[in-house]
Amino acid sequence: MERPERELVAQRQANLQALETLGYAPYGRAFRRSGRLAEVRAAFAEGRAVAVAGRIMTLRDMGGSVFAHLSDGSDRLQIYAQKNQLGEQAFTAFKLLDLGDHIGVEGRLFTTRTGEQTVKVERWTLLAKALRPLPEKWHGLTDVEARYRQRYLDLLVNPEVRGIFTRRAAVLAAIREFLDRRGFLEVETPMMQPQPGGAAARPFVTHYHALGTDMYLRIAPELYLKRLLVGGFDKVYELNRNFRNEGLSRHHNPEFTMLEVYEAYADRQAMQSLVQELIVHVARNVLGTLQVGSAEQTVDLTPPWPEVAYRDLLRQKMGADWFDLEPEQQRALATALGLAVPPEWTTLEITHEIYEKTIERTLQRPTFVVRFPTELIPLARRCEDDPGTVDVFELVISGHEIAPGYSELNDPLEQRRRFEAQSGPHAQQVDEDFLRALEHGMPPAGGLGLGVDRLMMILTGCDAIRDVILFPQLRPRGPRE
């Protein structure tokens, strides 16, 4: 029967006091290492003197000797402590150590009879005493949220979780390497803005006391990045956080990582090629394969990816005459699909609800959906052969949109008309400073956004966005929880 945690904590506190009595300070200073454990193992040489440090992950007491494994985040390495080598007091203190304690050891490398690389301890130092025990069966906890609330423990005892976030760091590095090599300049734009823009979403509101005004956490960096195109930067990107004061779900977190890229004198087709090349580059360089995802649902990223028009998808789903039907007929057909369609909804709203709820999820392989209705995307350029649509794509993979891309609208007069139509009676919400920038002349441009968290879900086969964010947002617990 497992001992209650309070008893284990009490025992550890008793060990701490005993260690202090023996002259071992429980929270030590910096410890100069020969290298990380992975580096020591890679440069292993019999008899070599080393100094290593890490957290104790296993302990095996043999009476006059103790075997243990240290972990420092790069690897594990066995250590071997003997009473005859350390002396009575140091060995007595060593046996007061608990799983989870951080120690530094000095000694020489040798190979055990079973072939395991090991450090024979000559001296050791207590660096940090762990007063709470490590979870023994963390992965099997019934309270799944505990893994997110105490992510540090999740990382500590689940190598596969650490692997996801190691790969995430490699993905970010690969994205930067790809864009930097193509001449794009990484920039930073305000995350706290006087007016939210660049997307249709509810912002988080804060108050700037020094200026006596409300400010907003950005929902998108788009309008500031376009100002940079006006200012003469022709190829820019930003890789940073966006914030949207909306719901939590398996595919939504209110704070998320977004890549946005803009290139002067380019268009939607150029951005389509760019995002396809980028994702293929990341998969090949980080995962070594274009077959990604999970064993249950593999996604083939092999290019070229198909392109299909938004209206064609609707006609395939709802019939060739869908756009000729009366709103009442459309509402009836949508209701028959199990969708909730309020009576005041327009054809545009009904159509897009069908697309988002019944069509998008069926697009499993990478697919570029193009030519969306103009009213849906006020920042994109109209298609020259069809003013009712805009020259955009949405890249859908595994049933979820992960990257929109546009031929950007650079006509300030048309942009004003669209902003005013979108804001309705709230004309004060029109971003006059952005319109003023456009009036100075923004070159024709292509732009794209890539949801990094959703890309990580696809690459790793994770079902929930919380699995690819180190510290996802959770509902606060009460004082007794």
Image (spheres, grey):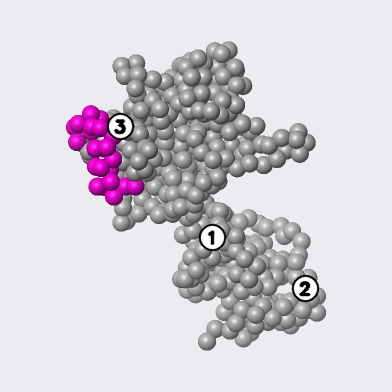
Q: The residue under label 3 is which amino acid type?
A: Tyr
Span colored in magenta: 319-340
The residue under label 1 is 148
Q: CA distance from mark 3 to mark 2?
A: 69 Å
Q: Nearer the viewer, mark 1 or mark 2?
A: 1
Q: Quadrant of residue 185?
A: top right
> How many labels, in total?
3
Q: The residue under label 2 is which amino acid type?
A: Tyr
The residue under label 2 is 24
In the image: residue 256, left or right of residue 280: right
Compare marks 1 and 2 and give the one earlier in the sequence: 2
Under circle 1, the secondary element is helix
Q: Quadrant of residue 476?
A: bottom right
Q: CA distance from mark 1 to mark 2?
A: 34 Å
Compare marks 3 and 2 and give the one earlier in the sequence: 2
Task: Tell me the quarter of the image containing the C terminus.
Answer: bottom right
Q: CA distance from mark 1 to mark 3?
A: 38 Å
**Residue name at image x 47 percent, y 68 percent:** 139
Whether residue 231 is visible, yes or no, is yes
Picture coordinates of residue 251, whole percent (x, y): 44, 49
**Residue name at image x 35 percent, y 41 percent:** 343
Do the residues bearing badges 1 and 3 touch, measured as CB atoms within 8 Å?
Answer: no
Circle 1 packing at 10 Å, graded few (<14), some (14-19), many (20+), is: many
Q: Which mark is residue 461?
A: none
Q: The residue under label 1 is which amino acid type?
A: Tyr
Picture coordinates of residue 152, whole percent (x, y): 59, 61
| Magenta run includes residue 38 | no
* Depicted 119 relative to depicted 332: above or below: below
The residue under label 3 is 310
Picture coordinates of residue 357, whole percent (x, y): 33, 45
Do the residues bearing badges 1 and 2 touch, measured as CB atoms within 8 Å?
Answer: no
